[in-house]
Image (spheres, grey):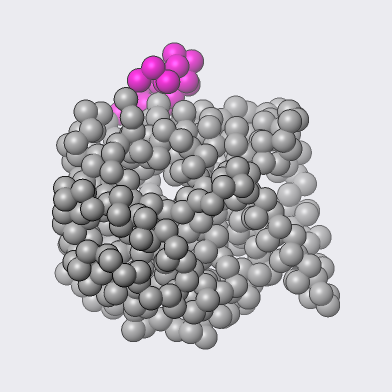
Amino acid sequence: MAELSRRKILISGGALGALGALGVATPAWSWAPSGSIAGAGTGADPRWVWDAEADPLVAALIDRGDVPLVNQLLWDWNRNDQPLPAGLPADLRDFMEHARQLPAWADRVKLERAAQFNKSRGLYLNLLNGVGGGMLSTAIPKEARAVYYSKGGADMEDRVAKTSILGFAVGDLNAYRPDGDCVVQAVKTRLVHAAVRHLLQQSPHWDGTIPISQEDMLVTWHTLPTFAMRRMRDWQVPMTTADTDAYLHVWQVTAHMLGIRDEYIPATWAAANAQSDQILPRNMGPTPEGVILTDILLGQLAEQTSPGSISRPLCNALARYLVGDQVADWDGIRREPVWGPLISTVWPLLVKFREGLIPLPLVPETAWVIDEAARQYILFYLTKGKETKIVIPTVNRPE
């Protein structure tokens, strides 16, 4: 691993030694399926459950050499209401027609309310899901290693751009409307996960286990809506119960569309917090790969916020403020003696100032315009203005 420089390995080495062997002797699964959206379940430990529908299908597509044609055909499949393109292999078409259907428990009223919540809280959510979720993901050893050694790890700008496509789709005003694209991006991501499960087991750098289990997906899920909701509550952002329930619901639907079994999807915020408290601690820690990926991500963020200027210290301080010192230390994020105290002091005041304006006429609409402009700028920067789509990989990270 030539890219893992001596300096960066040393950054994470002390924490690695303190943590010991990750994942060894972890507690058994004890979260009750009665707290899930399904209300019941088998109680099977999600560490040993994957995607029984997508995994054999995508493995067959790769082995048959069908993926390049499939990617070509799906390139222009962009809208939730758009028919699947002609020419897809029959087994893939059958799977996708089933996978693109919203669950019976999806509530259109809640989905519309979630869209309005995203409209007024977009600044916080983009920051927490984008920067915060990104920093948390690199402190999850299984996820950091899966990203690093899969094809996406060789081009992190492209990898982040494709991840952002799904994240931004969830936050769009028309996410699950007919003219939205959240269904499309979720189904494509589900196919990508299945491909990575198949391919990584063939990598000489992988330990032979099957990656991206149901628990792994739940861990990632909790670094997004659960983390975001907790931080907004920490910042005392005023939110109604109807709004927070709607925000949870859009992520519940998204979890289902990504292939997470309903018996694992929390039904309430209390259930989500309980599940997060059980599985995040045992799945988080430092890795050399995570330190490398963090450095790349923060370098991209610095360029996005102030291209051509020295903004990395500000990005370091912001990331540390969002995720806390332990995760930041695992990620090898430097402490910034000037920016760190400033952000921790000023940000809560900015939140209070902004929330004092929200009830005024036109402010939510104005805030949405600013937030949406920022989202589009980030996507344009990451993609270099090129059309970028989620596609199924056929190889791991090039040696």
Q: Is residue 67 above or below residue 365?
A: above
**Image quarter for residue 106?**
bottom left
Residue appearing at x 44%, y 24% in the figure: 12
Q: Main secondary structure of the magenta part?
A: helix
Specify whether residue 235 is in view: no
Quarter of the image with the N terminus is top left
For residue 112, side relative to residue 342 (left or right): left
- x, y (%) of residue 244? 55, 73
Residue appearing at x 46%, y 29% in the figure: 291
**Image quarter for residue 191?**
bottom left
- x, y (%) of residue 33? 26, 70
Which stretch is magenta? Answer: 1-20
Residue appearing at x 46%, y 28% in the figure: 292
- x, y (%) of residue 358? 77, 70
- What is the residue that sits farthest to the top in this orientation? 6
For residue 209, side relative to residue 316 (left or right): left
Specify whether residue 125 is in view: yes
For residue 374, side relative to residue 251 (left or right): right
Residue appearing at x 35%, y 54% in the figure: 71
For residue 43, side relative to residue 261 (left or right): left
Q: In terms of depth relative to the viewer, which is nearer, 12 or 86?
A: 86
- What is the residue that sits farthest to the front in this orientation? 87
Quarter of the image with the C terminus is top left
Q: In terms of depth relative to the viewer, which is nearer, 166 or 20?
A: 166
Q: In terms of depth relative to the viewer, which is nearer, 97 or 348?
A: 97
> Number of callouts in the render?
0
- x, y (%) of residue 267? 38, 74
Q: Is residue 399 above or below residue 248?
A: above
Residue 16 part of the magenta-drawn span: yes
Residue 39 part of the magenta-drawn span: no
